[in-house]
Image (cartoon, helix red, strand yellow):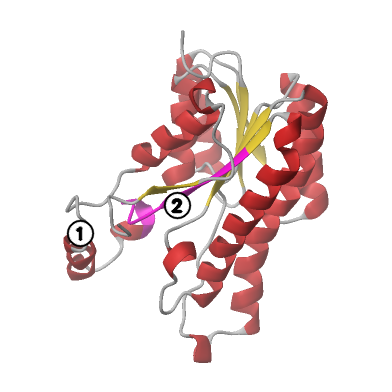
C-alpha cells in the first residue's frame, strides 16, 4: 500500500520548483492531489496532465491564497470536488530581496502578504473542514532563513519566522481535534530560482553545507510525504530542517 493512498491533499504554488515536486511526490504515493497556481497558467495546466499518469484524481486551481475569500472558496471547492481534505501544504511564496535601508514598504507588504497571510488564510479555511473530519495534517514550508535570518532578506526572514510561530500555535490549538501542524525549513535547494545565480555564489553555498551539495526539490517532497503520512501521527508543532546540515 502506498503511504498516502486514499488521502486528499492540497498543495499551493505547485506549478514549479518545490511545490511541483511535492505535488508529484504525493501523487506517486497514492494521494488525490489538488494544487494551485497563479501566474504560471501553462505550467499549471501541464502539471495536471502530467500527474494524471499516477492514476489518482488530480485537479489544478488558479487561486491566490493571499486573498482571504479566495482561500475560503478554494478550500470549499476542493472539499466539494474531492469529498474531503486530509492534507494541506502551504508552499506558495516569493522573494523581494534588498537591504533594509533600501527596502520599500511595498516590498515588505507584498512578501508578508503572500508568504505569511496566505498561510493564515488557507489554514483557517482548511481546518474548518478538518475539524469536522477530526483528522488533518497541515505542512507549512518555511526556510532556514526564518530560523537564522539573512542579510538582504529582512522581509522574507520575517515572513518565514512568522510561519514557524503560526505552526506551533496551530499545533497547540488543534491537537485535541487530531489535526497536526508542522513546518519544513529547506536550506539551499536547487530550483529554477537558483539556476540563475552566479556559479561562484552557488559554489560558496555548497562549500558551506556539510553534505557539500545543494538539495533537490524531491528531497523536500520526501519530507512532506513523511509528515503527511501515518508514519508521523505523533509528530506535531515541529520544524524539520531539510538543509544538508548547514544549521548544525
Q: Residue at x 55, y 63 (%)?
A: 161
Query: In the visual, does 159 lie left or right of 189?
Result: right
Q: Is residue 106 above or below residue 41?
A: below
Left or right, residue 215 beside residue 35: left
Q: Nearer the viewer, residue 233 or 99?
A: 233
Residue drawn 17% across the image and 69% down it: 200
Does residue 166 show up? yes
Report the magenta residues as a range.
181-193
| Residue 65 counted in the magenta span | no
> At numbered mark 1, what does the secondary structure look like: helix, strand or loop?
helix
Q: Where does residue 179 sit, x and y in percent of width and height? A: 69, 33
Disc on res. 185: 2
- Packing grade of label 1 (10 A; few <14, some 14-19, many >=20) is some
Relative to residue 64, is residue 99 drawn left or right? left
Q: Does the magenta segment cover residue 186?
A: yes
Residue 36, horizontal then vertical, whole percent: 62, 41
Depth order, front residue of 101/61: 101
Residue 25's x, y, as percent? 44, 28
Q: Residue placed at 55% from the left, 15% from the top?
A: 56
- Provide the secondary structure element on which disc 2 rests: strand
Number of marks: 2
Please give the residue where the numbered disc 1 appears in the rendered image.
206
| 44 sits to left or right of 198 | right
Residue sitting at x 41%, y 73%: 150
Amino acid at each position: 500500500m502506498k503511504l498516502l493512498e486514499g488521502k486528499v491533499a492540497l498543495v499551493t504554488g505547485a506549478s514549479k520548483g518545490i511545490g511541483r515536486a511535492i505535488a508529484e511526490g504525493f501523487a506517486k504515493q497514492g494521494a488525490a492531489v489538488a494544487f494551485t497556481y497563479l501566474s504560471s497558467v501553462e505550467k499549471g495546466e501541464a502539471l495536471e496532465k502530467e500527474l494524471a499518469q499516477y492514476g489518482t484524481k488530480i485537479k489544478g486551481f488558479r487561486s491566490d491564497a493571499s486573498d482571504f475569500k479566495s482561500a475560503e472558496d478554494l478550500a470549499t471547492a476542493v472539499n466539494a470536488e474531492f469529498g474531503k481534505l486530509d492534507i494541506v501544504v502551504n508552499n506558495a511564496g516569493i522573494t523581494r530581496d534588498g537591504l533594509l535601508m533600501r527596502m520599500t514598504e511595498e516590498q515588505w507588504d507584498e512578501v508578508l502578504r503572500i508568504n505569511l497571510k496566505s498561510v493564515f488564510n488557507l489554514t483557517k479555511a482548511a481546518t474548518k473542514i478538518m475539524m469536522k473530519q477530526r483528522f488533518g495534517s497541515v505542512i507549512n514550508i518555511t526556510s532556514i532563513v526564518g530560523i537564522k535570518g539573512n542579510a538582504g532578506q529582512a522581509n522574507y526572514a520575517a515572513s518565514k519566522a512568522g510561519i514557524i510561530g503560526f505552526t506551533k500555535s496551530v499545533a497547540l490549538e488543534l491537537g485535541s481535534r487530531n489535526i497536526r501542524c508542522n513546518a519544513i525549513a529547506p536550506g539551499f535547494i536547487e530550483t529554477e530560482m537558483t539556476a540563475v545565480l552566479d556559479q561562484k555564489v552557488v559554489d560558496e553555498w555548497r562549500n558551506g553545507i556539510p553534505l557539500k551539495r545543494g538539495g533537490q526539490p524531491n528531497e523536500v517532497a520526501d519530507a512532506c510525504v513523511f509528515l503527511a503520512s501515518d508514519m508521523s501521527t505523533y509528530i506535531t508543532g515541529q520544524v524539520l530542517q531539510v538543509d544538508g546540515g548547514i544549521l548544525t
